[in-house]
Image (tube, rainbow, N blue to C red):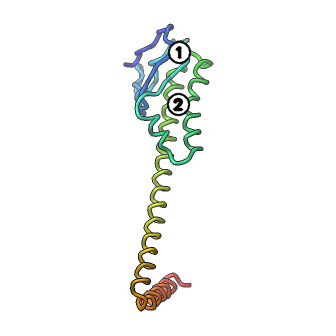
Amino acid sequence: GRYAFAGCSNLRRVAIPLKDGRLLFPHVSSNLPKCTQFHRTKNLATVDLVGRVHKTVASLHLESWINEMNEEIDRINRVLPTTGWYDKSYEIRQWTQSVNSRIEHYKAEHLALLKEATTLLELVLWKANLINDEDNFPDAKGKIDENIARQRQGKRITSGA
């Protein structure tokens, strides 16, 4: 709830799932959103993420992405010990939003790289099939070359080149 751990001065570590908006509740005196779950938890210094986030990070395509995500995930545990008790909920909320945003960005980049690789593989397979057809049907090579030349000329006309 709104003040789930507020005032728990002995709370040192908490494990939370990475869900955006989970730490946001309307403020009592207004409709403005406010984070209050960890108010007055002065000893809270460590937040662990639970769930599939670590599997997602480990499956990213580039080592640099994995390193950047692990650095961002660990950042809260460097910042939180020096954060004032009043700002801990807000800091955790900002951090979860940042981690979520970066994961979504890298997932989109990962998908783009996979699509590019798939396209290249399709082209290689297509070329391999053409070469195979030329070996099996030597008289087809001239027809294929003619078709390619005609297609190129058509593209030049439509592109204005």
Q: Seen in the image, is 137 located left or right of residue 149? A: left
Q: Mark 1 and mark 2 in contact (Cβ < 8 Å)?
A: no
Label 2 belongs to which residue? Answer: 95
Q: Dot 1: what SS?
A: loop
Question: 10 Å neighbourhood of mark 2: few (<14), some, or many (≥20)?
Answer: some
Provide residue 142's location: percent of width, then percent of height. 45, 91
Provide residue 85's location: percent of width, then percent of height. 55, 15
Cα gap from disc 2 to disc 1, whole angstroms = 15 Å
Where does the C terminus fall, quadrant-wise?
bottom right
Residue 44: assigned label: 1
Q: Residue at x 48, y 50 (%)?
A: 110
Image quadrant assignment for residue 143: bottom left
Q: Nearer the viewer, residue 132 or 49?
A: 132
Q: Residue at x 57, y 44 (%)?
A: 63
Where does the N terminus fall, quadrant-wise?
top left
Total labels drawn: 2
Residue 15: assigned label: none
Question: 10 Å neighbourhood of mark 1: few (<14), some, or many (≥20)?
Answer: many
